[in-house]
Structure formats: C-alpha cells, structure tokens
Amino acid sequence: MKNKWVKIRSFEKFYLAEIIKGYLIENNIPAIVLNKKDTILLHHSGQVELYVEKNFRSKALEILKDR
C-alpha cells in the first residue's frame, strides 16, 4: 500500500472519512478508508485515515482544500 496509496487526511469519526471518500470517488479519484481505531472495551483510540492513489494526490487535495 505504501507505493500506490498516500494518506491525505485523518479523522476521528469513521463516517466523516466515508463522506469525503464518497465525494472523491464521485470526482473520479480512487480513495480508500483505513480504520485504525481500537474499540476494545469501549476505549476508542487511533485514527481513521483516508488514502488516495498517489497519482491523484494533488487533484484530491485541490478538491478538498475548502472541506
């Protein structure tokens, strides 16, 4: 994943990452969400990370600059 995908943003809430991912996909930018949250014993820690294909990084950041 390190060679093809780059992280462009982190979120505390999973649903926010999914909303932004959907927006990127609507704009023909391949995107995935990686949930790194640990939910053991109701203790939520970690981040939800949004990745795009490396070739689309600049375009994705431009589209999201005001979001």
Image (cartoon, grey):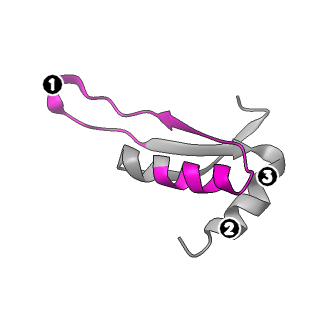
Residue type for callout 1: Leu
Q: Residue 43 colored magenta?
A: yes
Q: Position of residue 59 (x, y in %)?
A: 77, 62
Is 15 displayed left or right of 3 in the figure? left
Residues at circles 1 and 3 in contact by the CB criterion of under 8 Å: no
Q: Position of residue 62 (x, y in %)?
A: 71, 69
Q: Position of residue 20 (x, y in %)?
A: 53, 55
Return the residue at label 2.
Answer: 63
Residue at 66% in and 54% down: 26
Q: Is residue 27 above or below residue 41?
A: below
Q: For mark 2, does the 10 Å Cα neighbourhood hold few (<14), some (14 to 19), or many (20 or more) residues?
A: few
Q: Earlier in the sequence, mark 1 or mark 3?
A: 1
Q: Earlier in the sequence, mark 1 or mark 2?
A: 1
Q: Secondary structure at mark 1?
A: helix
Residue type for callout 3: Phe
Residue at 37% in and 39% down: 46
Q: Secondary structure at mark 3?
A: helix
Return the residue at label 3.
Answer: 56
Return the residue at label 1.
Answer: 41
Classify the position of the N terminus by image quarter: top right
For marks 3 and 2, give the CA distance. 11 Å
Q: Which residues are magenta?
A: 19-47
